[in-house]
Amino acid sequence: MKAAIINGFGDVDVLKYEDIKTPKPRPGHILIKVLASGINRFDHYIREGSVVPELPFPHILGADAAGIVAELGEGTNSFKVGDPVIPTAGFPTNEKEYHIRPAATAPSFTLPGLGIPGTYAQYIEIPAEWVVKDETGLKPEEEVATLPMVLATSVRALKVVGQVKAGDKVLVQAGGSGSGSMQVQVAKALGAEVATTVRSDAKGKVAKSLGADLVINTRKTDFVEAVREWTDGLGANVVIDNLGGDVLPKSIDAAGPLGVIVVFGFVAGTETTFNIQNFFFAQKQLRGTMAGDIEDLKWGLEQVRTGKIKPVLDRALPLNQAAEAHRLISNNEVTGNIALLPWAA
Ligand SMILES: NC(=O)c1ccc[n+]([C@@H]2O[C@H](COP(=O)([O-])OP(=O)(O)OC[C@H]3O[C@@H](n4cnc5c(N)ncnc54)[C@H](OP(=O)(O)O)[C@@H]3O)[C@@H](O)[C@H]2O)c1
């Protein structure tokens, strides 16, 4: 089969398009014919070498995919060949840990494209336990392929960790990003009012079209002040911070007393400092979130099926242009998510 592989860490040029052996599904596993692969910034971090210090090369990146069942391993009776399916973008690989929740706390938890071969390929082998039937009715597949990671992690961040409820005022950082564009929609599906930040009017327009009630261009407006005004001086109930670095202290400031700040990402940096006194006097809570469970993905897909949440596909490129796709992500030139088409080249 064709795959985009890396033989070492480095710049986008380490991504090569090659022929490799097609996997055979082991017992309990399904071979999925990948119709589209989704790309996330996380793949870019792995490629750079900033997630794990080593990998067995050659390595296939990619956690997200949409496809159809191509072959069934022994004991996988709940699927049939040809079923449209979506693999979960992270799960425990040790069967004895399949029951652990959150799944990301299981010692054997990993992602396709990290601990097992990823989705930038024409076929991928996934344990049947972690495959869901695609009942969204969505076409084309490249839209579906953008969903698993950003949808499951956003549901987890807002619904489970942030405990967002109807009427809450929620701030989502980077509403034009892959994760932020989902988080705006998940917050709306939970009945919240949503403010979001962007750095360009073009991304702001997209965030607005996804239902954001207030879009703040941080190149023109201070978001802490804008949120304070929007909440009549009270501050946000929940802030989803995808950015980290020097943005996180301001996210903490934008939350009101008892406000919850969910730490989700580190695009702006992995380290920061903030005023502890202000933080605990206002009894705020800082909560980390990592990945999403299969139940979060299923809840999110139900919102997609009923039209409350839409994929945000920037563009789809043939698989042999994986390096170009990574270049677009590195340069923040993507709105929403980007997909690869393994059968287009
Ligand atoms: N916790 C989890 O389970 C989980 C799951 C998925 C992703 N993540 C993390 O979440 C983060 C976002 O991932 P993603 O896939 O959504 O990324 P993405 O689609 O590449 O978006 C990143 C966004 O950050 C904005 N940005 C970049 N540098 C910035 C800066 N210095 N200040 C303000 N905004 C900046 C860019 O928008 P503009 O250039 O237009 O401003 C861009 O839209 C990553 O750190 C990722 O690892 C975490």
Image: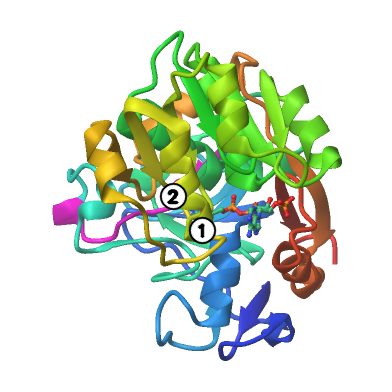
Few, some or many residues within 10 Å of mark 1 (<14, 14–19, 20+):
some
How are the colours assigned in the image?
rainbow
Q: Residue at x 42, y 61 (%)?
A: 111
x, y percentage for residue 5? 63, 80
Q: Which residues are magenta?
A: 85-97
Q: Is residue 307 above or below residue 27?
A: above
Q: Residue 1's quadrant in the figure?
A: bottom right
Left or right position of 274 against 106: right
* Disc 1: which residue: 246
**Label 1 vs label 2: CA separation?**
6 Å
Q: Residue at x 57, y 27 (%)?
A: 227
On whether ligand 1 comes within 8 Å of the CB at mark 2, the answer is no
The secondary structure type at the circle numbered 2 is helix
Is residue 144 visible from the viewing direction of this image? yes
Q: Which mark is residue 320?
A: none
Q: Is residue 65 magenta?
A: no
The secondary structure type at the circle numbered 1 is helix
Location of the C terminus by quadrant is bottom right
Q: Which mark is residue 249?
A: 2
Nearer-the-camera pick, 236 or 133: 236
Amino acid type assigned to the residue bearing label 2 in the image? Pro
Is residue 134 visible from the viewing direction of this image? no
